[in-house]
Amino acid sequence: MDELLGPIQDAFEGQIDFHGQRLAEILSTVLLILSAAVSFVVGYIFKDIHLTLWIGLAGTLATAVVVVPPWPFYNQNPEKWLARTDGRAAGPGVVVDGVKVA
């Protein structure tokens, strides 16, 4: 069952790395500015506010489709976290006065 649910769970968790977050931010900014500029110019040329709004909405939806899902190209550089050197399993814990607290 885990083989079936694993890819679905990964898709919903939305794992992207730090470089992917930066790329998503840049893409969202550029795509929204481009769609706003195109919608303004087209609306100005045709003197139609409805056309302007529809083009702006289409650009916003296209941006959401590109940015919101965790596409694989957003996770090209995953972080390599350090493993414990003493051989024990890594887990949460804080040492207070020499005593490990969960």
Image: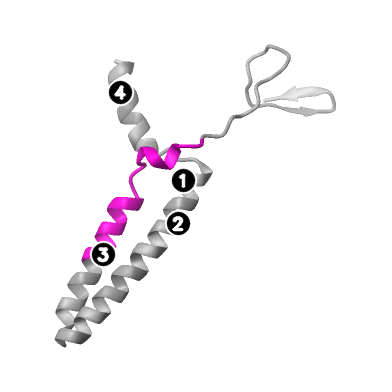
| N-terminal label among 1 and 2 | 1
The quadrant of the rendering that contains the C terminus is top right
Residue denoted by label 2: 25
CB under 8 Å between discs 1 and 4: no
Q: Determine which of the numbered discs, if any, sits on residue 20 in the image.
A: 1
Q: Residue at x 34, y 23 (%)?
A: 6
Magenta highlight range:
58-77
How many angstroms separate mark 1 from mark 2 (CA)?
Answer: 9 Å
User: Is 20 covered by the magenta stretch?
Assistant: no
Q: Residue at x 25, y 71 (%)?
A: 56
User: Which three-letter amino acid code belongs to the residue tagged 1?
Assistant: Gly
- Label 4: state its secondary structure: helix
Q: Residue at x 44, y 38 (%)?
A: 75
Q: Determine which of the numbered discs, if any, sits on residue 5 in the image.
A: 4
User: Which three-letter amino acid code belongs to the residue tagged 3?
Assistant: Gly
Residue denoted by label 3: 59
CB under 8 Å between discs 3 and 1: no
How many angstroms separate mark 1 from mark 4 (CA)?
Answer: 24 Å
Give left or right: position of 29 versus 91.
Answer: left
- Secondary structure predominantly adopted by residues drawn in magenta: helix
Q: From the image, state whether disc 3 or disc 4 is nearer to you.
A: 3
